[in-house]
Image (cartoon, grey):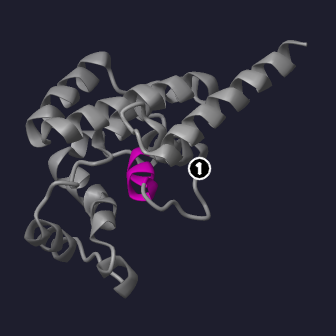
C-alpha cells in the first residue's frame, strides 16, 4: 500500500528547486503540467493531488541533461537502452528520470511518481490512472500550442463536461 503524502511546503520547495534546474521554457512547461495534472486529478484522484503535483514537477527532471549525463546515469543504474530507445533521443529523459529522482530527490521516491515519470512520454500497456493523468497532462498542458495538443485538450474537456452533464441528469 502506497500512502506517501507530501506537504504544501515540500511541493513549494520542490518547485523552487526545479526552477533552478530547468531552462525558463522547460520550467513554464513543467508548471503547466502540474496545473493540468491537479485540474484532472480533482476529477479522478482527489486523494493524490499532492503526488500528482510532485510527479508533474519531476517529469522532465533529466530532460535537459547532456547526452553524457544521460548515459552516465544509465550506466550507474544499470539501465539498458534498446536500439529503439537509442533512435529516439527525445525520449531518453523518461528512461533515466526515475534514476535521477532516486539520486537527487530520495525523499520523493514513491512508486506512483516513479512509474508516472517513466511512462509520461510513450506510456505502457499496464499504466495506472495516475500514470495516464501525467502523460495526458504533459501532452495537453495549456502552453502546448501544437494543433494536435490543442484538439486533444479541447476534446478531453468537452467530453468531461458532457459526462458531468449526463451524471447530473
Q: Residue drawn 60% across and 44% down?
A: 129
Q: Residues within 10 Å of mark 1 (few under 14, many from 20)?
A: some
Q: Is residue 118 magenta?
A: yes
The quadrant holding residue 8 is top left
Q: Is residue 52 left or right of residue 7?
A: right
Q: Position of residue 144 (x, y in %)?
A: 39, 39
Q: Is residue 19 above or below residue 167?
A: below
Would residue 126 be seen by someone viewing this image from the given angle? yes
Q: Is residue 126 above or below residue 22?
A: below
Q: Which quarter of the image is occupied by the C terminus?
A: top right
Give the residue number, with chain letter if any, for mark 1.
128
- Helix, strand or loop: magenta stretch: helix
Q: Is residue 135 left or right of residue 13?
A: right
Q: Residue drawn 30% across and 64% down?
A: 90
Q: Residue drawn 42% across and 57% down?
A: 121
Q: Which residues are magenta?
A: 113-120
Closer to us: 92 or 74: 92
Q: Is residue 146 left or right of residue 60?
A: right
The quadrant holding residue 160 is top right
As drawn, which residue projects farthest toward the front?
147
As drawn, which residue projects farthest toward the bottom?
83
Q: Position of residue 45 (x, y in %)?
A: 58, 29
Q: Is residue 44 above or below residue 65?
A: above
Q: Is residue 70 magenta?
A: no
Q: Residue drawn 61% across and 64% down?
A: 125
Element class at badge 1: loop
Q: Position of residue 17 (x, y in %)?
A: 13, 33
The quadrant holding residue 50 is top left
Q: Position of residue 149 (x, y in %)?
A: 49, 44
Amino acid at each position: 500500500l502506497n500512502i506517501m503524502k507530501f506537504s504544501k511546503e515540500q511541493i513549494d520547495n520542490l518547485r523552487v528547486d526545479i526552477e533552478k534546474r530547468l531552462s525558463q521554457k522547460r520550467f513554464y512547461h513543467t508548471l503547466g503540467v502540474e496545473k493540468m495534472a491537479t485540474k484532472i486529478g480533482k476529477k479522478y484522484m482527489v486523494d493524490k493531488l499532492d503526488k500528482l503535483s510532485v510527479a508533474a514537477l519531476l517529469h522532465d527532471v533529466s530532460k535537459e541533461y547532456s547526452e553524457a549525463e544521460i548515459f552516465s546515469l544509465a550506466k550507474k543504474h544499470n539501465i539498458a537502452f534498446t536500439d529503439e530507445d537509442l533512435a529516439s533521443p527525445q525520449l531518453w529523459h523518461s528512461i533515466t528520470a526515475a534514476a535521477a529522482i532516486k539520486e537527487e530527490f530520495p525523499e520523493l521516491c514513491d512508486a506512483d511518481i516513479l512509474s508516472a515519470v517513466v511512462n509520461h512520454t510513450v506510456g505502457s500497456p499496464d499504466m495506472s490512472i495516475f500514470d495516464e493523468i501525467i502523460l495526458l497532462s504533459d501532452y495537453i498542458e495549456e502552453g502546448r500550442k501544437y494543433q494536435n495538443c490543442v484538439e486533444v485538450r479541447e476534446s478531453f474537456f468537452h467530453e468531461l463536461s458532457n459526462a458531468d452533464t449526463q451524471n447530473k441528469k
